[in-house]
Image (tube, grey):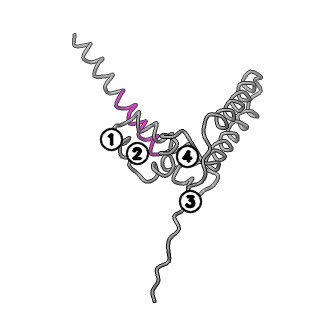
Amino acid sequence: MSETRFIGGECQFMKRIINLLYIIAGFLALGLGIAGIVLPVVPTTPLFLLASFCFVKGSKRFEVWFKQTDLYKKHLESFVRERSMTFKQKASILLFADFTIVVAFFLTDFLPVKMMLVAIVIYKYYYFIFKIKTIREPQAPAHKKSRTS
């Protein structure tokens, strides 16, 4: 009977470790996503999606916190709510994914893996073109100049 408690305690310990790893991965993805705001090569939206996923898996508190940030609201909220992205967001994700898939494609000599990578690229473009709605970039509100006469 004491062995059962130990195993249960061990499971709790492993669950906490896994949750901690998800939280750490969430903050790493968040940091890279923030870097992607200023670095055009780094895709912001998929990294924020990864951060959101990690926070959901790791901690309810971090999930709630992240969903209240301006970063989440600006970059992910419309996608999560409406399944839509701007053309710029789509292109950024597709190009970054293409780059990583091309690297993997040329690093392997195993034909079935190459075929699988080509199938992934085809499906990825199908999904982004036909399943995710493309929306216009949100226009910045025009500020009226105040008259000081």
Q: CA distance from mark 2 to mark 4?
A: 14 Å
Q: CA distance from mark 1 to mark 4?
A: 21 Å
Q: In this picture, is 89 found above or below 58?
A: below
Q: In this picture, is 17 found above or below 43?
A: above
Circle nearer the N terminus (1, 2): 1
Q: Would you name the residue on which mark 2 appears?
A: 67
Q: Would you name the residue on which mark 3 appears?
A: 139
Q: Nearer the viewer, residue 72 or 16?
A: 72
Q: Is residue 27 magenta?
A: yes
Q: Nearer the viewer, mark 1 or mark 2?
A: 2
Instruction: Identify the amino acid type marked 2.
Output: Lys
Q: Would you name the residue on which mark 4 appears?
A: 45
Q: Residue at x 56, y 49 (%)?
A: 44
> Under tag 1, what secondary structure?
helix
Instruction: Identify the amino acid type marked 1.
Output: Arg
Instruction: Identify the amino acid type marked 3.
Output: Gln
Residues marked 1 and 4 touching at CB (< 8 Å): no
Q: Is residue 113 left or right of residue 46?
A: right
Circle nearer the N terminus (2, 3): 2
